Image (cartoon, rainbow, N blue to C red):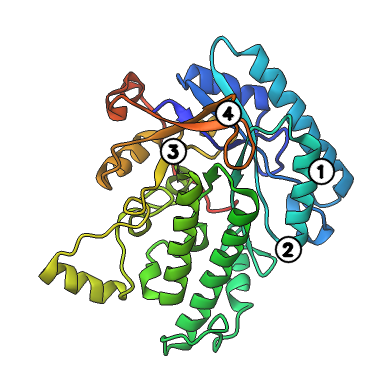
C-alpha cells in the first residue's frame, strides 16, 4: 500500500543516508500517497552516542532535531499537492531521564509534532539493535539466575537470562506507552532481532508482559507497525513476526504445536485483541524507500491481515492530544495499483 509511517534520512541521522528532501522525492517517485517523516529524538548523555556520532556535542543533537522539524514542515508544504507528509518522531528510552526530556520536547514543539512512533532500542542502557556483540552485552547484563523479581518456571539458566532480558524490554515499552500514548507502536518485537526464531511463548513471564502491552495499546487506539526493515536485516518476516500477530497461548511453543495438532484451538494476539496494523518501510535513506514492500505484502497476506490503517491529520484531538487519527483503508489493499509496480528487495548487514 502506498503508505509508510516511519523513516530517517542521513541529513538528521548519522546512520542513515541522503537528505530528507531526497527521501521525499523518492517516495513521490515510487507512488506513495502518505509518507511519515520521523526522526530519533536527541540523546542527552555522551555515553549514549553511537560510534558514528563520536565528537558530536549534545546541544548539536538537540539543534539537529529542531532543524529536522523545520525542514520536514517545509517539505510538507512544498509537496502538499503531490504527497501527504506527516511529521513525527521516534522515541528513545535508555533511562527514565529520556522520558522526562521527551516530555519537555513535546511541550516545546507540540505544534510541530503530529505523531509519535513508540520504540525501544535499549535494554539496561545498552543498544539491542546496533550489532550482535552489543546485543550479547545487553543480554549478558542480566544474571543467569534472574527472573524479573518473580518466580520463573524456566529451569535452564540461559533461558532465565533471556526471559529477564525480554521482560525488561517489555516493561520499558509499557512505561513508554502509558506515558506518551504513541500513535504507532514501532517494531514491537525488535528485542529478538538477532534471534528471529525465538518464540515469546517459550518465556511465560515475557509473554504475559507482551500481551499486557498489546492490550493497553489497543485500548487507546494505537496502530501496530508492520515494519519492512526486518526483511532487509535477514528475517523472512516483517516486524512483528507471526507469533505476535496471530498465535497466542502461554504454553511453550513446542508443546503448543502439539496441542494445535490435536485440538486446533483458535488464538490470536494483536489480531485477537482487536489491534490495527499500519505499514512502514523504516527507511534510512532514499535507497530504502519502499524497500522490500512486495515481500512485506506477501507476509501480510500470509498472516491473514486484511485490514490496514493509515494516520491522517484531524481537527479532532486523539487520546494523546495530538491532531492525527487512524483511518481504515476501505479498499482491498492488495488490489491497489501500487503493488503492480516493481519494488526493490535486498538484505543488508544487521546494524542499526
In front: mark 4 or mark 2? 4
- C-alpha span from label 1 to label 3: 29 Å
Choose the circle earlier in sequence order: 3 or 4: 3
In front: mark 1 or mark 3? 3
Tell me if I can see residue 128 in this picture: no
Q: Say above or below: 224 vs 265.
A: above
Secondary structure beneath disc 2?
A: loop
| Residue topped by disc 2 | 95
> For the residue carrying disc 3, how many other residues have a C-alpha within 10 Å: few (<14), some (14-19), or many (20+)?
many
Please indicate whether residue 344 sits to the left or right of residue 255 in the image. Answer: right
In front: mark 3 or mark 4? 4
Choose the circle earlier in sequence order: 4 or 2: 2
For the point 49% across and 76% down, which residue is it?
163
Q: Position of residue 352 (x, y in %)?
A: 60, 51
Q: Say above or below: 186 vs 329.
A: below
Q: Say above or below: 92 vs 127.
A: above
Q: Position of residue 76 (x, y in %)?
A: 64, 19
Q: Position of residue 186 (x, y in %)?
A: 53, 48
| Residue topped by disc 1 | 61
- C-alpha span from label 2 to label 3: 28 Å
Amino acid at each position: 500500500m502506498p503508505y509508510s509511517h516511519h523513516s530517517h534520512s542521513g541529513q538528521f541521522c548519522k546512520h542513515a543516508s541522503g537528505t530528507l528532501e531526497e527521501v521525499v522525492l523518492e517516495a513521490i517517485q515510487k507512488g506513495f500517497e502518505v509518507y511519515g517523516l520521523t526522526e530519533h529524538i536527541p540523546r542527552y548523555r555522551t555515553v549514549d552516542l553511537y560510534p558514528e556520532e563520536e565528537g558530536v556535542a549534545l546541544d548539536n543533537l538537540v539543534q539537529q532535531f529542531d532543524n529536522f522539524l523545520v525542514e520536514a514542515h517545509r517539505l510538507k508544504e512544498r509537496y502538499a499537492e503531490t504527497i501527504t507528509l506527516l511529521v513525527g518522531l521516534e522515541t528513545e528510552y535508555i533511562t527514565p531521564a529520556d522520558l522526562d526530556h521527551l516530555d519537555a520536547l513535546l511541550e516545546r514543539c507540540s505544534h510541530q509534532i503530529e505523531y509519535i512512533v513508540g520504540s525501544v532500542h535499549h535494554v539496561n542502557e545498552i543498544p539491542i539493535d546496533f550489532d550482535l556483540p552489543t546485543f550479547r552485552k545487553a543480554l549478558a547484563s542480566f544474571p543467569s539466575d534472574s527472573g524479573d523479581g518473580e518466580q520463573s518456571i524456566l529451569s535452564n539458566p540461559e533461558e532465565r537470562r533471556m526471559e529477564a532480558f525480554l521482560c525488561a524490554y517489555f516493561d520499558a515499552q509499557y512505561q513508554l506507552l502509558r506515558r506518551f500514548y504513541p500513535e504507532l507502536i514501532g517494531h514491537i518485537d525488535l528485542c529478538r532481532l538477532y534471534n528471529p526464531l525465538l518464540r515469546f511463548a517459550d518465556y511465560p513471564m515475557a509473554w504475559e508482559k507482551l500481551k499486557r502491552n498489546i492490550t493497553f495499546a489497543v485500548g487507546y487506539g494505537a496502530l501496530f507497525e508492520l515494519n519492512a526493515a526486518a526483511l532487509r536485516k535477514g528475517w523472512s518476516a516483517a516486524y512483528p513476526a507471526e507469533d505476535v500477530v496471530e498465535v497466542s497461548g502461554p504454553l511453550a511453543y513446542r508443546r503448543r504445536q502439539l496441542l494445535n495438532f490435536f485440538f486446533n484451538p483458535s488464538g490470536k494476539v494483536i489480531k485477537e485483541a482487536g489491534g490495527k496494523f499500519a505499514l512502514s518501510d523504516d527507511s534510512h535513506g532514499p535507497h530504502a524507500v519502499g524497500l522490500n514492500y512486495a515481500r512485506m505484502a506477501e507476509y501480510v497476506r500470509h498472516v491473514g491481515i486484511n485490514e490496514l490503517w493509515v494516520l491522517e491529520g484531524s481537527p479532532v484531538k486523539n487520546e494523546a492530544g495530538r491532531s492525527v487519527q487512524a483511518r481504515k483503508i476501505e479498499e482491498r489493499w492488495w488490489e491497489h495499483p501500487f503493488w503492480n509496480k516493481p519494488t526493490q528487495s535486498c538484505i543488508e548487514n544487521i546494524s542499526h
